Image (spheres, grey):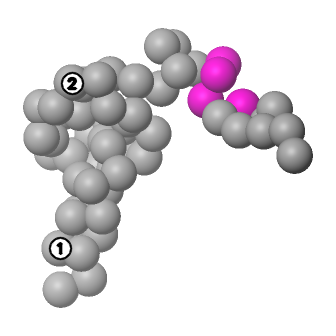
Amino acid sequence: MSKAHRGSGVRDQYRNGRGTCPKCKRTGVKVLYEATLEGAKTKVCKPCNANLKKQASA
């Protein structure tokens, strides 16, 4: 089967959602998850989002 719709949610974003994560400073990763860092809402990568949620639940 065709995979025509895969990634269609990020095609309209700047550079297909890729950039530099403000938390881990990695470049070229998808920054798609909104998180609150230092009182401001920013977009972070998937591993940082999981780490922040893990810290919040503990």
Which dot marks residue 24? none
Which amino acid type is shown beneath numbered disc 1?
Gln
Q: For the residue labelled by badge 2, is the local secondary structure a helix, a strand or a loop? A: loop
Residue 51, image x, y percentages: 21, 64
* Occupied quadrant, residue 53: bottom left
Which amino acid type is shown beneath numbered disc 2?
Thr
Residue occupying image coordinates x 45% and y 39%: 32
Residue 33, image x, y percentages: 42, 46
* Residue 37 vertical position relative to residue 9 in the rendered view, above or below: below
Residue occupying image coordinates x 29% and y 49%: 36
Residue occupying image coordinates x 12% and y 40%: 24
Rendered-image quadrant of the C terminus: bottom left
Q: Tell me where the magenta segment starts and ends, as one range.
A: 8-12
Q: Main secondary structure of the magenta part?
A: loop
Judge whether residue 1 is colored magenta: no
Which dot marks residue 27? 2
Judge whether residue 10 is colored magenta: yes
* Residue 49 vertical position relative to residue 40 in the rendered view, above or below: below
Q: Which residue lies furthest to the right in this view?
A: 1
Residue, disc 1: 55
Task: Tell me the distance, in whole angstroms, between the alpha carbons under discs 2 and 1.
Answer: 23 Å
> Which sits earlier in the primary sequence, circle 2 or circle 1?
2
Residue 22, image x, y percentages: 18, 33
In-image side of 38 versus 49 (left or right): left
Residue 45, image x, y percentages: 32, 43
Q: Is residue 41 visible?
A: no
Q: Which residue lies furthest to the bottom in this view?
A: 58
In-image side of 51 versus 34 (left or right): left
Seen from the viewer's position, the closer of residues 35 and 47 is 47
